[in-house]
Every structure is written in structure tokens, then in C-alpha cells.
């Protein structure tokens, strides 16, 4: 069983107690391999090694930066580009921040300037949902993911790039990992949180078996916790993105790829949901005034 590190282990970067053979195996893997993500079996269980500085910037980040320079929308701004050392420091800082706020994150077993070793948290939400899809899974985990993202936002936090492949289940709660991005460093927190919700709805729209019911429950669950400023910012975000829906549908007639379909379904749903939400609140206020 993993135990608290002693002083000498903490100085080396170890956050839990490891047997000598495990330390040797871990250090050998860290030194001999350059894989960005790697699983390693130790005597105390499996761990995951994550490195920074081993890949080129993603095409999406480049496109996002280009679009942000052309269009005056805060939610398009990419997270600051950092060195591998700074990226790893940012990810560790954000993991600690989430943990201190009471949210579930993987335990850090070892860390260095450019690598981090995390406990194996088991299958991701995406893995669980994909396995159970053929068995008629009712999508509760997808809804729960949105609800707990709303709780995250209510606590003044932002994931940055939420996806169900980076969520896991532990003790009945949704756990969060992969904190490489920090959009609130370049945009208002409300904008970053609104973008969080839109990004999460992209995979939700693809994995939900009962799309309308599941997305509806997910939005209601999120909005029940999310700050009003974030909901207002989401309304502005989807109004802007909604302008591209006709073009997206036109392109889809020729070639409807999975990413394009997710964009259409998620954006169209959220655009209608936030407007319906406003209409319901306005109607409610009018009723009280009568």
C-alpha cells in the first residue's frame, strides 16, 4: 500500500513511499523512455507517467491562436505557451489546487521538472460509457460529469479542456485529471468556465445514447450550480458559435466528420437551451409581477 513519504523521499520528488525495487524501475523508465504517456506496473500497483516537451503543439492550438488574432472573442484565446518545465509546474499546481478545494484528482507519486507519476485511477468515464453503451447504459455518468463540472465552476475553478476521457469515477464522485491548459490566465473566469461547458458537450453529444434527454439533464444539472455570470457568458459564446452553424451544416452535406457533427449537435443544443432558460426565467418573473 502507498504510504506518506518521509523527508528524504520528498526531497527526491517522491510523494508516497515506494519500495527500492519500485524506485529503481521507475527511475529506469523515466531515464530510458521518452513516451509522453506511459503505464508502468509496480509492486504496489500500476502508475502512469506523463512527460512534457515530447510533442509538437497540437493543430487545434495553432488554429485557435490564429482565430483569436482575427476575431475579438475572449473565449478563443489559447492558454499561454510555456516551456516544458513551466507546463509541468502549471499542471502540478492546478492538481494541488483542485485537491485542496475538495475535488478528486489522481495522487501524485513522483514529480520532477518535466515528468509526473500518477496513481492508476482505473477506467475513464469515456471508457466506462463506451463499454456499457451496448448494454443500454442510461447516461447517468455523462449527466453527473456535467453536474460536477458545475460544482467546480461554483468553487471558482476551471478545468480548461474538459473531456470524459480525462474524467474518472472514484468513491461515487467524478475525478478530474489533465490540467495542461489554464484559459483563465488569458480571459475572464466566466468566459473560461463557459468554454469549459461547451467543450464538455462535444463528447457528451457523441456518447449520449438518448441525446436530447441526456444533454437536457446535463445542462440543467450544470446550470443549477454554475455562477450566473458563467451562464450569461455561455449565452454569448453559443450565439457567436451559432453563426457558424449554417456553414457547418452546408459542409456536412458533402462530408460530415465526427468532429463537425459534435460541433453542430452541441452548439445547436446549447444555443436553444440557454435561450429557453432565459425565456423561462422571464416568464417566471412576469408571472410574479401580475
Image (cartoon, rainbow, N blue to C red):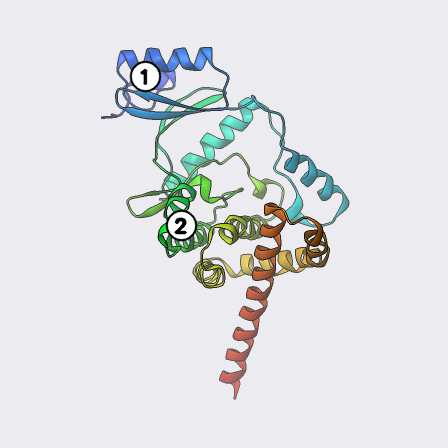
Which mark is in front, 2 or 1?
2
Residue 100 spot, x, y in % from top left: 37, 40
User: Helix, strand or loop at disc 1?
Assistant: helix
Tag on residue 133? 2
**Is disc 2 placed on a helix, strand or loop?**
helix
- Classify mark 2: residues with Cα within 10 Å, few (<14), some (14-19) or many (20+): some
Query: Where is residue 184 drawn, in percent x and y?
Result: 57, 43
- Seen in the picture, residue 290 relative to 194 is either above or below; the reply is below
Q: Quadrant of the N terminus?
A: top left
Mark 1 or mark 2, which is nearer the start of the sequence? 1
Image position of 21 (left or right of 272): left
The residue at 42%/50% (across/down) is 145
Work out how far the residue at label 2 is from the one at label 1, CA to CA, in angstroms: 44 Å
Residue 75 tag number: none
Can residue 255 be spotted in the picture? yes
Between 66 and 256, which is closer to the camera in this rendering? 256
Residue 9: mark: 1
Residue 217 location, quadrant? bottom left
Q: Is residue 16 above or below residue 151?
A: above
Q: Nearer the viewer, residue 209 or 237?
A: 209
Query: Quadrant of residue 108 in the image?
Result: top left
Amino acid at each position: 500500500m502507498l504510504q506518506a513519504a518521509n523527508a528524504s523521499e520528498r526531497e527526491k520528488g517522491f510523494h508516497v513511499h515506494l519500495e527500492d525495487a519500485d524506485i529503481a524501475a521507475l527511475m529506469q523508465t523515466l531515464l530510458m523512455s521518452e513516451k509522453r504517456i506511459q503505464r508502468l506496473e509496480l509492486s504496489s500497483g500500476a502508475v502512469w507517467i506523463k512527460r512534457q516537451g515530447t510533442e509538437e503543439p497540437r493543430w487545434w492550438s495553432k488554429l485557435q491562436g490564429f482565430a483569436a488574432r482575427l476575431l475579438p472573442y475572449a473565449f478563443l484565446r489559447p492558454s499561454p505557451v510555456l516551456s516544458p518545465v513551466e507546463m509541468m509546474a502549471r499542471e502540478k499546481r492546478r492538481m494541488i489546487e483542485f485537491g485542496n478545494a475538495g475535488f478528486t484528482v489522481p495522487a501524485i507519486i513522483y514529480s520532477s521538472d518535466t515528468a509526473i507519476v500518477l496513481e492508476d485511477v482505473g477506467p475513464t468515464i469515456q471508457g466506462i460509457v463506451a463499454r456499457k453503451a451496448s448494454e443500454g447504459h442510461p447516461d447517468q455518468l455523462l449527466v453527473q460529469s456535467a453536474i460536477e463540472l458545475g460544482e467546480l465552476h461554483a468553487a471558482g475553478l476551471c478545468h480548461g479542456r474538459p473531456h470524459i476521457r480525462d474524467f474518472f469515477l472514484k468513491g461515487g464522485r467524478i475525478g478530474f485529471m489533465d490540467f495542461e491548459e489554464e484559459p483563465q490566465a488569458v480571459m475572464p473566469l466566466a468566459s473560461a468556465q463557459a468554454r469549459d461547458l461547451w467543450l464538455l458537450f462535444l463528447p457528451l453529444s457523441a456518447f449520449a445514447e438518448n441525446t436530447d434527454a441526456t444533454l437536457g439533464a446535463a445542462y440543467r444539472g450544470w446550470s443549477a450550480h454554475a455562477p450566473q455570470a458563467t451562464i450569461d457568458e455561455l449565452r454569448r459564446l453559443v450565439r457567436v458559435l451559432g453563426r457558424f452553424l449554417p456553414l457547418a451544416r452546408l459542409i456536412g452535406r458533402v462530408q460530415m466528420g465526427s468532429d463537425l457533427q459534435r460541433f453542430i449537435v452541441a452548439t445547436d443544443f446549447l444555443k436553444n437551451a440557454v435561450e429557453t432558460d432565459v425565456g423561462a426565467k422571464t416568464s417566471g418573473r412576469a408571472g410574479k409581477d401580475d
